[in-house]
Structure formats: structure tokens, C-alpha cells
Amino acid sequence: MPRMQEWSKRSSRVRRLEIAAWALGAVLLVAYGGIRAWSSLARADGIAAMQQARIHYAAAEGEEPPLTTAAPDTSTWAPKRLAAYRESLHDPQRPDAVLRIPKLKLAVPVFDGTSEINLNRGAARIEGTAAIGAAGNLGLAAHRDGFFRPLKDIRVGDPLYIDTIARTLIYRVSSIRIVTPTEVDVLAPTDKPSVTLVTCYPFYFVGSAPKRFIVQAQLEDAGRRAEPGTTVAAL
């Protein structure tokens, strides 16, 4: 009888441990789902604002707007980068465009100027480079541990798209380079419309990365153009 009682007590403890383990697993699963759901909603904020603006513009023109794709998965982002992005949403602003690279499942809102908040909430047009859609070399920068992390898998020949309110610009990657921070010639003006993506390198370097990862692409199709004098700020 004592052995049966001891066995019963042990069996009861095992059951309690199993129940606790299942409960903990359920809590972790719910927490993970909540984080993924939040990141899925929050990261689309700037992109959703651009899509809404495109819808209004197309409605005024009597046309159907081209659709912007969903934002990329943020599960590979550095925790500090995700936290900085979340904080940046307290100061909402409609982006000037959305950069998309479907092959990489990358979609990022593009803001004007490389301020800290712009780099926290998306990609930023580098001051002194061409305007979006204009002739010349448009420079776009973003963090390697955030939106531009997928660039590690880009290849020459891949298409990329820049959606503005009135049109979608189509580019094709022509070169990929790794340079030092002093090699600023990658942002030199060009005769033809082009875009240069800039991020730090190596992608998983601990600390301040010593080099820059450069993706250059040439314009293939300017898409539907806005009326002369129309600007994003005016819409």
C-alpha cells in the first residue's frame, strides 16, 4: 500500500508538471502570435497611408489604382530596430513612395531626408540625390538590421518597383557592390534615371558595420505620369 501511495503521488506530480508545461507553451504561443500580429499591422502603417492616397488619386482620375503589396516579415529584424520602428509610429507621416522588391518580399515606405525618425520608420531619400522619378541618381538608404536586411539575397537582373501616388516606376538591378563609407561616387549624378540602394555591411555584423552594400538599378518603365505640377504634398 505505501508503494501504491508513493506511485500515486509521483504520478500526480508528473501530471501537474505536464499541465504546467502545456500552459506555459500555450502562453508563449499566444504571445508569439500577438507579436507577429502587431508587427504585421504596424509595419504596414506607411504603406497603408500611401495606398489610401493612391486610391483617392485614382478615384479623382476615374481610374483603378495599382495595388501596393503587403509589407515584409519583420521576424529577422534586430530587437532594437523593431523597437525604434514602433516608437517612430508615434509621429505618423505619409511617405513619398513605397519601394517594393517582390522577389525578396520587401516593401518599405520611402520618406524624404535621412533623419533618424525617417530611417526608423522606413527608407529615406539621401539628400542631394535625384527626386523620385526624376532624371538622375535617386539614393535610398535604410538599416541593414531592419527593412533592408533582405537585400542580402538580391541579384543582378532582379526588378524593383517604386510606387508613388500617380504611378509605378519599374527598375532593374544592374550592379551590386561592397564599398567603404568614403566611396561616395556611387551616389554621383547619372544621365539616365536610376536608383541606388545603400545599407551597411556585413548584414549581421555586431556593432557599427565597416562597409556599405550598394545596389544600383536602371529605370525600365516610368508608368503612368501625374499631371504637370502635381506633387505628393499637393494631393
Image: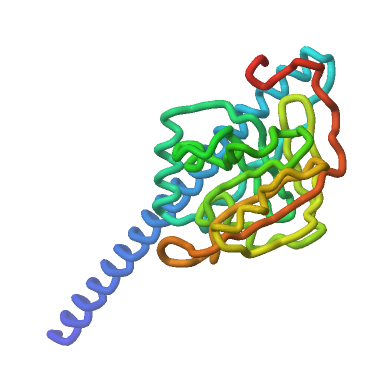
**Residue 14, horizontal then vertical, whole percent:** 27, 74
Number of numbered discs present?
Answer: 0
Give the quarter of the image for residue 64: top right
Q: Residue at x 84, y 35 (%)?
A: 222
The residue positioned farthest toward the top in the image shown: 60
Q: Is residue 200 left or right of residue 152?
A: left
Q: Residue at x 26, y 76 (%)?
A: 11
- Give the colour scheme shown: rainbow
Quadrant of the snapshot with the N terminus: bottom left
Q: Residue at x 58, y 37 (%)?
A: 127
Give the quarter of the image for residue 181: bottom right
Quadrant of the snapshot with the C terminus: top right
Q: Is residue 116 left or right of residue 136?
A: left
Q: In the figure, 150 relative to 222: above or below? A: below
**Residue 146, horizontal then vertical, whole percent:** 52, 52
**Residue 152, horizontal then vertical, whole percent:** 63, 62
**Residue 37, horizontal then vertical, whole percent:** 50, 44
Q: Residue at x 57, y 60 (%)?
A: 212
Identify which residue, 32 or 42, lies in the foreground: 42
Q: In the figure, 234 relative to 15: above or below? A: above
Q: Is residue 89 left or right of residue 232?
A: left
Give the quarter of the image for residue 134: top right
